Image (cartoon, rainbow, N blue to C red):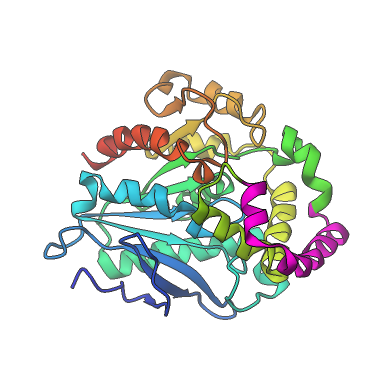
Amino acid sequence: MASLLPPFLRPHPLNIPHSRCKNAIYDRRPPLGPVHALWWPPLRQEQALDRIILFVPGNPGLIEFYIPFLDAIHQHQHGEQLGILALSYMGHTPGFPDAGVDCLNLPSQVQGFIDAHDNIRAAFGQNIPMTLIGHSVGAWVATQVLKQRTASNATAFLLFPTLSHIAKTPNGLRLAHFFSPGPRQFISTLCHLAWFLPFFLLSLLFRSWPKEQVVVLSKLIRSPSAALACLTMAHDEMRTILEPETSMLVAHQERLYFFYAQQDDWIGNGRQEILLEFRDDEGKRVVIGDGPIPHAFCISHWAPVALQCCLWLQLDTLSR
């Protein structure tokens, strides 16, 4: 039945309030451990799936941040026969088993999404249309999936994509030091003190955030292991994502869609590099959003709605 979880997921004991998504656990193959998963079954449960979205988060990779955004996609007309799978990164979800250092690096995280792609194909067929939606570094991860699965018919929608020289962006230059081994260990240790921070004070500090998103943040900053995992992966991003893989991007041009903000301090000059390669597709495959849509759009009250309009247009194109 369509209402059941796919065979590669198992139920999570807690329900997600105010959402149609199913809380689940995705067991990565050994030696990697389980990660948090969310699954949106089709709205018409009596019919089989005809499309699947695999969502790849940014960093921190807590998929609860993206529930309102993915709910909005699923509640649109595409949700009638659409399934959505969102996966966290290894070690990023508080309450899940701690991951070893070797599991936190970027190649291991990428492999997890390649495996998820393969599991979807095995469960629902090789020909079912699949769209990868990646946010921030998740956009880079999505391109690596396409790179490794060239025979797949998957397409990718890249939101605020950090595809090159993250360490040289304005935010990278300001924050990279905090991701190195010594500082990140110190920062993660400070998370023990966050248990003494009252929730109402955290809500005041982040008063522009929806309450549900502040709850997710509070879980993260009270988990030393999850904070360390996020910072460790960020350090690996700085060292790994360097020159843009323009030849690979051009080779997969017909499968890629880009969404950029007008101003994004996590991308810097990276947008211009893409626009030079895809200049004939600007406005079609490369969209620059109107207004001050933030890089961390998922924690804004209004940005998911604005971004959703663009996604509906592009998903209409992808589903034809």
- Residue 105 sits in quarter: bottom right
Residue name at image x 20 percent, y 45 percent: 77
Residue name at image x 28 percent, y 61 percent: 126
Given residues 16 and 283, the one toward you in this image is 16
* Image quadrant occupied by the N terminus: bottom left
| Side (left or right) of 77 relative to 13 | left
Q: x, y percentage for residue 279?
A: 48, 19
Given residues 13 and 284, the one toward you in this image is 13
Residue 216 vs 13, above or below: the answer is: above
- Residue 201 sits in quarter: bottom right
Residue 160 vs 58, above or below: the answer is: above
- Residue 230 sits in quarter: bottom right
Please name the predominant secondary structure of the magenta segment in the image.
helix
Q: Quick one: which residue is furthest to the left in this view?
A: 46
| Side (left or right) of 85 relative to 141 | left
Residue name at image x 30 percent, y 39 percent: 315
| Side (left or right) of 144 relative to 315 | right
Residue 315 vs 186, above or below: the answer is: above
Q: x, y percentage for residue 146?
A: 45, 50
Q: x, y percentage for residue 134?
A: 48, 47
Residue name at image x 35 percent, y 60 percent: 18
Given residues 156 and 202, the one toward you in this image is 202
Q: Is residue 185 magenta?
A: yes
Q: Is residue 205 magenta?
A: yes
* Image quadrant occupied by the C terminus: top left
Q: Which region is colored magenta? A: 179-206
